[in-house]
Image: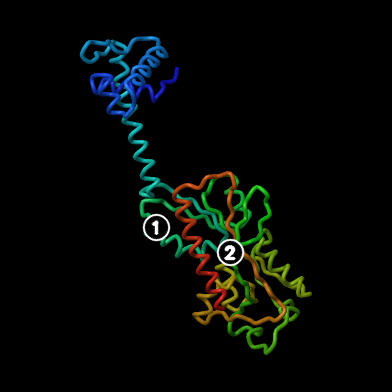
């Protein structure tokens, strides 16, 4: 029969304080409750644990056998409570994050850095995976936080808009497109378009924007990963449509230029994905607060622009 930890605590208190009255005062309960608890434990175990005396109590053989283990059990309980307190205070623990590549590489680093400085005892694990991978990991309870750059319509998830994103056409400064006085979606469609792999939902977003503009890219190079795309385009291989967040560094260095293309608008929303029935851990709640603040800053920048 499993031991009732609550009753074991009463028993150990009686022994440790050498009496029912002192044990009751130490635990902040009534003496009859302590007496009843010890009797219930003896009844459950089928053996006497204490020998009642006029002054204090003595252990029976069964009581001596249980008391040594009771001290170990209660010590383990205290250690577990202390460990949980550490997690609640974020002195320790883990935070598992899955995010689409653009978000993982260009938006999360400063947020994760701020979290790590505030909670150095929490181990942070970041997985940069396509949106479908974010969804799979969240539904399997493998991560605490999920952020997606492509649309998600899974009814098992709550999709919460986080930040707006604009994708723009980019090419190397020496590319023929960069010297054109006027660009249209049809002109771009005649050039080599460097895009994410076919399984990428972001690729679908870009191609859908071309269709809305009445243009259809004739040549597409498929590349896995944003950084390889940036490097290829910066070295003169075609053009691409990338998030402003992803190309800011290369534009600042003069290795990429933004191509204004009236009629080609590619906007999307970065979303936070949540399991409605899941209770967020203390670490996840703390990280969500930082995500909220980042969203507020992003919204203010968008309004100013």
267 above or below 129?
below
Among all residues in the image, which is located at the extreme right? 214
Q: Which residue is mark 2?
A: 225
Please identify the quarter of the rendering in which residue 167 is found.
bottom right
- Give the percent coordinates (x, y) of residue 61: 29, 10
Which quadrant of the figure contains the C terminus? bottom right
Would you identify the image quadrant in which residue 130 lies? bottom right
Residue in the foreground of this view, choosing between 132 and 270: 270
Specify the label residue 116 is tagged with.
1
Q: The N terminus is located in which quarter? A: top left
Q: Specify which label sits upstream in the sequence, 2 or 1.
A: 1
- Is residue 212 toward the left or the right of residue 23 in the image? right
Say which residue appears at 34% left-offset and 20% top-offset: 34
Under circle 2, the secondary element is loop
Between marks 2 and 1 in the image, the one whose residue lies nearer the viewer? 1
Q: Position of residue 252 (x, y in %)?
A: 50, 80
Q: Judge from the rendering whether residue 29 lies leftward or rightward of residue 108; answer left or right.
A: left
**Which label number is shown at residue 173?**
none
Q: In the picture shown, does residue 139 fall above or below 305?
A: above
Q: Residue furthest left?
A: 55
Q: Is residue 162 above or below residue 121?
A: below
Q: CA distance from mark 2 to mark 1?
A: 26 Å
- Crowd rating for badge 1 (residues with CA inside 10 Å; few <14, some 14–19, many 20+): some
**Where is residue 287 drawn, in percent x and y?**
46, 56
| Nearer to the camera, 262 or 42 | 42
Could you tell me which residue is drawn at 36 percent across and 32 percent down?
77
In this image, 34 relative to 149: left or right?
A: left
Question: What is the x, y in percent for residue 115?
Answer: 42, 58
Secondary-structure class at tag 1: helix
Compare residues 122 and 40 and report the one nearer the observer. 40
**Most foreground residue, 181 or 269:** 269
């Amino acid at each position: 029969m499993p031991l009732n930890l609550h009753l074991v605590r009463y028993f150990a208190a009686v022994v440790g304080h050498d009496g029912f009255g002192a044990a009751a005062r130490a635990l902040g309960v009534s003496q009859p409750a302590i007496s009843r608890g010890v009797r219930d434990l003896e009844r459950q175990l089928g053996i006497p644990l204490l020998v009642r005396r006029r002054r204090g109590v003595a252990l029976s053989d069964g009581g001596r056998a249980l008391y040594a283990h009771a001290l170990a059990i209660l010590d383990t309980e205290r250690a577990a409570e202390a460990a949980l307190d550490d997690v609640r205070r974020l002195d320790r623990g883990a935070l598992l994050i899955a995010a689409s590549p653009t978000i993982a590489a260009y938006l999360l680093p400063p947020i994760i850095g701020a979290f790590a400085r505030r909670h150095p005892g929490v181990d942070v694990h970041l997985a940069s995976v396509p949106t479908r991978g974010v969804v799979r990991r969240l539904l399997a309870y493998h991560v605490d936080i999920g952020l997606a750059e492509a649309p998600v319509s899974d009814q098992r998830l709550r999709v919460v808009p986080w930040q707006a994103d604009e994708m723009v056409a980019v090419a190397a400064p020496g590319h023929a497109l960069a010297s054109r006085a006027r660009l249209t979606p049809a002109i771009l469609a005649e050039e080599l378009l460097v895009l994410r792999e076919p399984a990428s939902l972001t690729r679908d977003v870009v191609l859908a924007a071309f269709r809305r503009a009445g243009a259809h890219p004739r040549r597409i190079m498929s590349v896995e990963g944003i950084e390889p795309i940036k490097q290829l385009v910066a070295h003169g291989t075609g053009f691409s449509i990338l998030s402003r967040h992803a190309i800011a560094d290369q534009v600042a260095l003069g290795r990429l230029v933004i191509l204004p293309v009236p009629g080609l608008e590619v906007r999307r929303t970065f979303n936070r994905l949540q399991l409605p029935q899941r209770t967020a851990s203390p670490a996840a709640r703390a990280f969500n607060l930082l995500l909220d603040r980042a969203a507020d800053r992003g919204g203010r920048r968008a309004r100013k622009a």
